[in-house]
Image (cartoon, grey):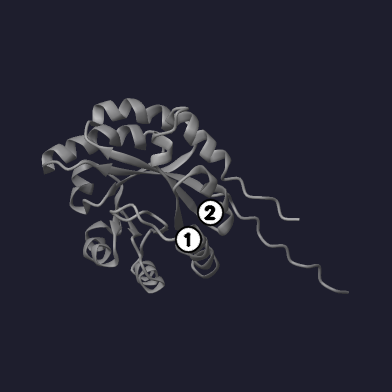
Amino acid sequence: MASPPQTEAKRVAPRLYLVTPRVEDAVAFARELAPVLAATDIAAVLLRLAPGGESELIRRVKALAPIVQGTGAALVLDGHPDLVARAGADGAHLTGIDAFNDAIGSLKPDRIAGAGGMHTRHDSMLAAEASADYVLFGEPDVDGARPSFGAIEDRVAWWAEVFQSPCVAFAANFDEVGPLAAAGADFVAIGDCIWSDARGPAIAIADAAERLTLPEKV
């Protein structure tokens, strides 16, 4: 008697990774951030800090950390790995393989070390081999440029098929969220389009969350 066909395990829908604007006034931003965190499930917040002295940057992080972590989300700093422990953050996101390699020793094993700005597949694999907690694809560079959306989808699908390390895919707008989820992202990062949405960021993030639902397989 023939064995029944094995069914593929149902993949869990990805979670959101919220990217903040450049934060200068943490107290004012906290009032905007809290309702966004309350609107839906958010796995982590990538905190982008406006330039400032070390003590000031630490104060900003400390003002926001309880708000983020109180919801169960991780607070990850965009750069500044040297401030993570002192400011009470959960980890740092490092852009470029050299920055990642320079910082990982100070973060692991107790803190999150995320890798972004991986311009080649080889760099992405090196970051994963070095125990990156995730690799981010599709984020804009300092000039706002990013690969074509098709290239981002391809990179995410390749990673999801080959590697176990979590993949974060950056969505520049709401229409990219669903396709990136379907491509195999474990997390979908979203930022500027949330904060600039005329409906308000809390409604916008809830909209993004609804788009994470994976299509049912026939």
Q: Is residue 189 visible?
A: yes
Q: Quadrant of the C terminus?
A: bottom right
Residue sitting at the far right: 1
| Label 2 packing within 10 angstroms: few (<14), some (14-19), many (20+) | many
Task: Tell me which residue sits at (35%, 27%) in the image.
Answer: 32
**Image-based side of 146 in relation to 216, left or right:** left
Task: Tell me which residue sits at (67%, 50%) in the image.
Answer: 215
Task: Tell me which residue sits at (36%, 54%) in the image.
Answer: 140
Looking at the picture, how far across and down is residue 176, in whole percent?
Answer: 52, 49
Residue 180: numbered disc: 2
Residue 119: numbered disc: none
For the residues labelled 1 and 2, say whether their Cβ atoms are less than 8 Å apart.
yes
Mark 1: amino acid: Ile
Tag 1 residue: 152
Q: Quadrant of residue 25?
A: top left
Cα separation between marks 1 and 2 = 8 Å
| Label 1 packing within 10 angstroms: few (<14), some (14-19), many (20+) | many
